[in-house]
Image (tube, rainbow, N blue to C red):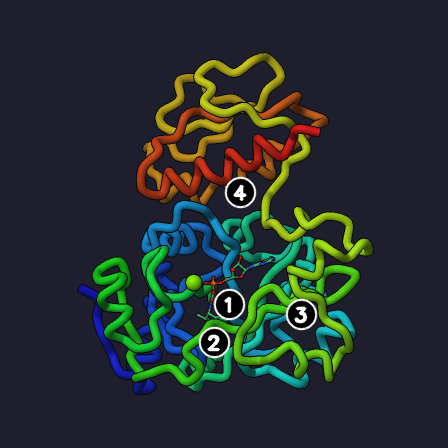
Amino acid sequence: MPIVIDPTPEHIAQACVALKQGKLVAIPTETVYGLAANATDDKAVARIFEAKGRPSFNPLIIHIPSLDKAETFVTITPQAEKVAEAFWPGPLTMILPQKPHSPISKLASSGLQTLAIRMPSHPVARALLKELDFPLAAPSANRSGHISPTNPSHVMKSLGDKVDFILADGQTHHGVESTIIDLSRNKPVLLRYGSILKHEIEAIIGPVLTPEEITKNTQITAPGQLESHYAPHLPVRLNVTTPQKGEAFLTFGPVLKKDDTVFALSDKGDLIEAAANLFKLLYEADNPEKFTSIAVMPIPRQGLGLAINDRLTRAAADKSP
Ligand code: TXA
Ligand code: MG
């Protein structure tokens, strides 16, 4: 069972130690409880997906303590600066272009070139973030498909011993997840409704589109642009046991011959390790100067393997012209 602690300074320090060790800590925010882990640690992030039993890797929101810190990871556009000034800290997430050498786990951002980033206002979340020297990836602290938790007992019921610590601070204030605004496109788009309203954002930066409006708007080329997916340059072949000459080979389990065409997701056949390595290795293998395509060994379709297969299927499908 998780260790449930109230947010005294000693307990916050204890939670920081756990997070530094790559553990999962459920934390209160002003919206809902988040399942937090070190956003720069692939393995810790993989544990989030495993704990939630998520069948696909949705990109996660990255929580930061200040606008300065945000600038380490994303480009703060003039619009973003205004939005941050108006609504941060608070229940608003911005999608912004990610900086090229950002240390955020590619699993956390699903290999996208953008990043969802937010500065929470909850004093416990802020205390943690100030003390840590890395940001926190934190989706809502519930099993996939369950409702978002607004108090510690929800977290306990939904995740139980999947989480190491619960920082318990009663009921959350807003009870719905943060508003998400995408500022990485040519026009601002509201991706998720939350307690900061469209007209409040429009008062700061002018017209904001909703996903429904995008389909009608010719300036944004395709509604498919809104889908989060990772498309490698090279074709991807799945369920391959024997790769062809010239192919990069993503392997799962013990490999007899290891050379520079082999990218081992997990030698041990461990799904958490494979998930942690997935996006990183897809990036490395996606090198048209060295390889003709990417072949991937079969990955078991169970547990975290469902999420891995989901992302691989998208990566494979996206190559069709
Ligand atoms: O209030 C909240 O935002 C809570 C608390 C814990 O902070 N967190 C939360 O996170 O709701 P999560 O991971 O459940 O929601 C993340 C949402 C998903 O719908 C995901 O698709 C979207 O953000 N998202 C993340 N990165 C994105 C990106 N680069 N582009 C578009 N959407 C993105
Ligand atoms: Mg959620």
Q: Point out the frontmost of discs 2 and 4.
A: 4
Residue type indicated by callout 4: Phe
Residue type indicated by callout 1: Pro
Q: Is residue 40 visible?
A: yes
Q: Residues within 10 Å of mark 2 (few under 14, many from 20)?
A: many
Label 1, label 2: how far apart the Cα atoms are: 7 Å
Which residue has dot 3 on it? 71
Q: Say whether disc 2 or disc 3 marks the residue closer to the N-terminus.
A: 3
Residue toward you, 80 or 209: 209
- Tell me the residue at 62%/83% (across/down): 87
Q: Decide: marks 1, 3 in contact (CB < 8 A)?
A: no
Q: Position of residue 156 (x, y in %)?
A: 23, 68
Q: Provide the secondary structure element on which disc 4 rests.
A: helix
Label 1, label 3: how far apart the Cα atoms are: 12 Å
Which residue has dot 2 on it? 129
Quadrant of image for the C terminus: top right
Residue 291: quadrant of the picture: top right
Which residue has dot 1 on it? 135
Which residue has dot 4 on it? 279
Q: Say whether disc 3 or disc 4 marks the residue closer to the N-terminus.
A: 3
Q: Decide: marks 1, 2 in contact (CB < 8 A)?
A: yes
Q: Decide: marks 2, 3 in contact (CB < 8 A)?
A: no
- Tell me: is circle 4 under 8 Å from ligand 1: no
- Tell me the residue at 77%/64% (across/down): 187
Q: Is residue 313 above or below residue 123?
A: above
Q: Position of residue 233 (x, y in %)?
A: 68, 33
Label 3, label 4: how far apart the Cα atoms are: 23 Å
